[in-house]
Image: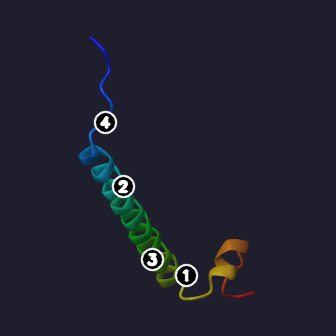
């Protein structure tokens, strides 16, 4: 039994899946970024360094 080459439909479906995956990753990164900014009240640098509001 030999391995048959992929049909043209499979390569189109693969490229569509990769594109959709990239869109989903971008959306998740955007939501994560907005969440971080909202939680840190816009001062991400202060949150990263660990400085408190009193300093």
In the structure shown, which secondary structural element does the residue marked by tag 2 occupy?
A: helix
Q: CA distance from mark 4 to mark 3?
A: 42 Å
User: In the rendered structure, which disc, 4 or 2, sits on the residue that comes first in sequence?
Assistant: 4
User: In the rendered structure, which disc, 1 or 4, sits on the residue that comes first in sequence?
Assistant: 4
In the structure shown, which secondary structural element does the residue marked by tag 1 occupy?
A: loop
Return the x and y of residue 44 as percentages of the image width and height.
Answer: 62, 81
Return the x and y of residue 18 as percentages of the image width and height.
Answer: 38, 55
In the structure shown, which secondary structural element does the residue marked by tag 4 occupy?
A: loop
Residue found 33% across the figure and 31% down from its top: 5
Crowding around mark 4 (Cα neighbors within 10 Å: few <14, some 14 to 19, many 20+) is few
Residue under label 2, please give it: 15
Residue found 70% across the figure and 88% down from its top: 54
Q: Quadrant of residue 46?
A: bottom right
Crowding around mark 3 (Cα neighbors within 10 Å: few <14, some 14 to 19, many 20+) is few
Residue under label 3, please give it: 35
What label does residue 40 carry, if any?
Answer: 1
What label does residue 6 carry, if any?
Answer: 4
Q: Are marks 4 and 3 in contact (CB under 8 Å)?
A: no
Q: Are marks 1 and 2 in contact (CB under 8 Å)?
A: no
Q: CA distance from mark 3 to mark 1?
A: 9 Å
């Amino acid at each position: 039994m030999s391995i048959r080459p992929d049909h043209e439909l499979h390569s189109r479906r693969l490229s569509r899946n990769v594109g959709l995956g990239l869109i989903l990753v971008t959306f998740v990164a955007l939501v994560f970024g907005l969440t971080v900014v909202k939680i840190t009240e816009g001062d991400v640098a202060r949150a990263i360094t660990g400085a408190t509001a009193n300093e």
